[in-house]
């Protein structure tokens, strides 16, 4: 059930198709109810009109035939769903008349036409009667009532009586004859079930056709949206995306056009910013070199040393800025690698340099990324952990539709209110700005930029004791 609910929430095709079918079934069932009620009403009117016209003809015939033939005339006019008989006088009891009609219908038409009215059908014999076998007179008595006759429904007779029985499934007419007797006509036919008509088949056929057409239409809509989703995810990870084809309905076409324009503007913005950053870093080299030459001419040794240190720091920051510009300007190829092997290799290389780094092996994870940039990010985080805490522990975890590269240390940690500040360019917690106690403050900025280019991020959290730096990458 949860899988169906998840599929419903995630699938636009399922929601559109289900909505179309729901609207279809609701409208069809409403129409079905209206049509079925109209069908019953028309049948009711038609039956009573037919009974009226037939009763008029039979009554005239009975009045004109020689004596003794009246019962035969009434009997031979009976059909599968009607019974004619003559009574000595008009009935005064509704129940008695309805029971008489029931017993008349118990006799099969074949036996009735052969003059064997007393014949009772056997269970195993061919039974030709509209009432079910084993039914009791209560079937006809249910919902029986006298009704006022109109001349049209009573064959033109104003003195005839009409009645209903079997909850509207049966109708009767009692026409007084000139000699004091009464001609009785009863009609009964079990109302067919709606499922025995062509309507359910028509509904099912319509649902199938609507489903097929709806599925094709939804697929035509969802396919461009799927391409757009994939392209957006790829662009969010910093990969080059082929411009989407601008085709299909106007809404879809305009969406694809807007995405292509957005992608082009983003690329221009990044290119212009990177070019400007590189130009600034490059242009700073000349005045820094001039300052260094002039500082060499300062006779005060202490002042000269302080000036040279400041110039060296500025030059280091300039080189770091150029390195950042080159990093963003270089479009590394994206490919699928063994991420566990990449992390383990970085840890082994740092361990060979004498750093206290331990990699905890886990499951192998194949991941599509730009390996060189990711390797630089991992290296920066591990070096920071070793520099400020003396050691680092690295492992890989997969959870919540993401891959996390965890770098843990047991150092002093970072104040909670400074955890976002450390990602700002040139920000350093260590206030002396000495290159012996830290870098220029671009390491974490570059690392987060690379992680975000992959569609992920770097998240810092406190440990007891120490700090955890997590590179969170989407799967």
Image (cartoon, rainbow, N blue to C red):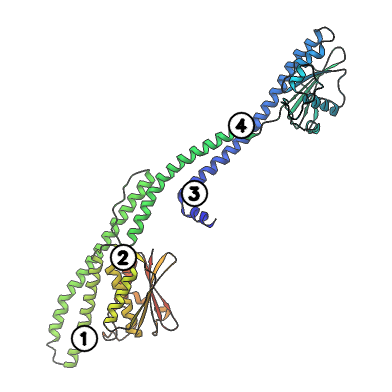
Q: Is residue 141 above or below residue 422?
A: above
Q: Quadrant of the C terminus?
A: bottom left
Q: How many marks?
A: 4
Q: Are marks 3 and 4 in contact (CB under 8 Å)?
A: no
Q: Which residue is mark 2?
A: 337
Q: Quadrant of residue 323?
A: bottom left
Q: Which residue is mark 3?
A: 15
Mark 1 crowdedness (10 Å alpha carbons): few <14, some 14-19, many ≥20: some
Q: Are marks 2 and 3 in contact (CB under 8 Å)?
A: no
The label shown at residue 309 is 1
Query: Which is more N-terminal, label 1 or label 3?
Result: 3
Q: Secondary structure at mark 1?
A: helix
Q: Residue at x 41, y 81 (%)?
A: 415
- State the separation of the CA atoms marked 3 and 4: 31 Å
- Residue 228 percent across, percent down from the top left: 36, 52
- State the separation of the CA atoms marked 4 and 2: 63 Å
- State the separation of the CA atoms marked 1 and 4: 98 Å
- State the separation of the CA atoms marked 2 and 3: 37 Å
């Amino acid at each position: 059930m949860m899988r169906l609910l998840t599929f419903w929430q995630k699938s636009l095709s399922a929601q559109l198709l289900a909505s179309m079918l729901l609207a279809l079934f609701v409208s069809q069932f409403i129409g079905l109810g209206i049509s079925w009620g109209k069908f019953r009403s028309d049948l009711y009117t038609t039956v009573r009109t037919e009974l009226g016209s037939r009763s008029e003809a039979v009554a005239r015939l009975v009045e004109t035939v020689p004596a003794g033939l009246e019962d035969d005339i009434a009997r031979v006019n009976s059909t599968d769903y009607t019974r004619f008989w003559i009574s000595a006088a008009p009935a005064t009891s509704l129940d008695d008349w309805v029971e008489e009609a029931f017993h008349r219908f118990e006799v099969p038409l074949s036996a009735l036409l052969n003059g064997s009215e007393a014949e009772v059908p056997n269970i195993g014999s061919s039974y030709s009667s509209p009432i079910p076998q084993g039914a009791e007179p209560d079937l006809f008595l249910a919902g029986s009532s006298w009704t006022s006759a109109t001349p049209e429904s009573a064959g033109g007779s104003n003195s005839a009586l009409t009645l209903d029985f079997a909850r509207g499934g049966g109708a009767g007419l009692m026409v007084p004859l000139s000699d004091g007797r009464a001609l009785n006509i009863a009609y009964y036919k079990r109302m067919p079930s709606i499922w025995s008509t062509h309507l359910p088949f028509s509904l099912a056929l319509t649902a199938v056709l609507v489903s097929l057409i709806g599925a094709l239409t939804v697929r035509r809509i969802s396919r461009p949206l799927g391409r757009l989703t994939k392209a957006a995810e790829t662009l969010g990870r910093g990969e080059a995306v082929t411009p989407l084809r601008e085709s299909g309905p106007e809404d879809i076409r305009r969406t694809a056009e807007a995405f292509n324009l957005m992608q082009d503007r983003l690329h221009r913005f990044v290119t212009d910013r990177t070019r400007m950053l590189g130009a600034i870093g490059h242009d700073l080299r000349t005045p820094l070199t001039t300052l260094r030459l002039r500082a060499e001419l300062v006779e005060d040794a202490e002042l000269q040393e302080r000036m040279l240190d400041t110039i060296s720091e500025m030059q280091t920051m300039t080189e770091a800025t150029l390195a950042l510009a080159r990093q963003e300007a270089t479009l590394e190829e994206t490919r699928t690698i063994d991420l566990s092997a990449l992390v383990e290799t970085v840890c082994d290389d740092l361990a060979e340099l004498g750093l206290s780094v331990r990699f905890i092996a886990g499951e192998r994870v194949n991941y599509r990324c730009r390996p060189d940039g990711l390797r630089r990010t991992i290296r920066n985080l591990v070096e920071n952990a070793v520099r400020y805490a003396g050691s680092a522990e690295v492992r890989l975890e997969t959870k919540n539709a993401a891959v996390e590269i965890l770098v843990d240390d047991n150092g002093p940690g970072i104040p909670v209110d400074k955890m976002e500040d450390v990602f700002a360019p040139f920000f350093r917690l260590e206030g002396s700005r000495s290159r012996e106690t830290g870098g220029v403050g671009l390491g974490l900025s570059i690392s987060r930029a690379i992680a975000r280019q992959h569609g992920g991020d770097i998240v810092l959290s406190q440990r007891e004791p120490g700090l955890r730096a997590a590179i969170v990458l989407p799967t």
